[in-house]
Amino acid sequence: MSTSASAGPGAPAPFPYKLVATDLDGTLLRDDQSVSQRTRDALDAVTAAGAAHIVVTGRSVAWTKHIFEDLGYEGLAVCGQGAQVYHAGERRLLTSVTLDRQLAGLALSKVEAEVGPLALAASRDGMDGAVLLGPGYRVHEGSLPYLPFEDPAELWAEPLNKVYIQHPGLSDDELAKVARTTVGNLVGVVMAGEGVVEILPLGLSKATGLSLAARRLKLKAADTIAFGDMPNDIPMFGWAAHGVAMANAHAELKAVAHEVTASNEDDGIAVVLENLLAR
């Protein structure tokens, strides 16, 4: 997929990027989990101009499929923090990376030795992989479906993409920092949102998943503009030619962004895309 040929007299100029990568929560989605009509129209306009749109989210495929159906989205998506590349149109999982459960268990024991007991959740592998929720793990009201567990053995019974950790006394940033310092040589650690600190396969990120998806479209980092709001989007910004942080973004992401747009509630993606289309 590529941008359209050079514009003729009176025609709009080609869109300057061949790939638009958008995070979901806090970025493409408003706080009520909807996508505004203005943002839908802006994405339709850039794809009509020849660019591809790829959703890049920390959510697993199982927690994302209903959003794709609502959007009429049929392209590639990067889910599970880069672990899964999914073809929405074909409803098919193209690639999947799983977490070494023995290594993850070792990492958790080392973190707990530093900070005390953690509340745990985990995302199972596969298109319909359940999210497991352990005792004490806090979820937001209106959260997506999950399966509670009591016996720790249930957590490790099937292949996983990632494990979520929470601590009763530490902030998300503090917990992520301690975990990264303690076990960053064994596993990946990211802070992906409020109450969401994740343990991932070492080296996995949104950037690795996005690069795989882009390669399937014969596109490159230099072709890409990316939008996000949390520290887990930092690798994606490092990979893309241009990174745009939302006004509601975490300070760590704003620090590495090329620009900051309006918030997810105020159509920040549309603001940037409309300006680029108007040039």
Image: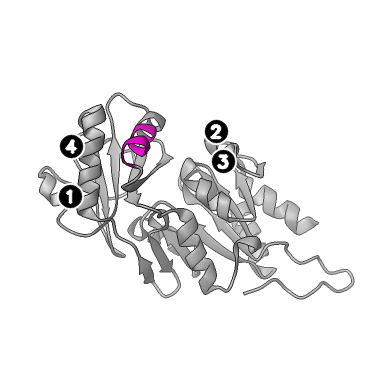
Residue matched to label 1 = 155
Which of the two discs, 4 and 2, sits closer to the camera? 2
Give the numbered dot on residue 174: none
Give the numbered dot on residue 135: 4
Picture coordinates of residue 245, whole percent (x, y): 59, 43
Magenta span: 176-183
User: Which element type, helix, strand or loop, lies under badge 4?
Assistant: loop
User: Which element type, helix, strand or loop, lies under badge 3?
Assistant: helix
Q: Earlier in the sequence, mark 4 or mark 3?
A: 4
User: Which element type, helix, strand or loop, lies under badge 1?
Assistant: helix
Does residue 35 show up? no
Q: Earlier in the sequence, mark 4 or mark 1?
A: 4
Lateral position of residue 240 relative to residue 274, left or right: left
Q: Residue at x 31, y 65 (%)?
A: 127
Q: How many marks?
A: 4
The alpha-carbon separation of the residues under discs 4 and 2 comes to 31 Å
* Circle 3/circle 1 CB separation < 8 Å: no
Which of the two discs, 2 and 3, sits closer to the camera? 2
The alpha-carbon separation of the residues under discs 4 and 1 comes to 12 Å
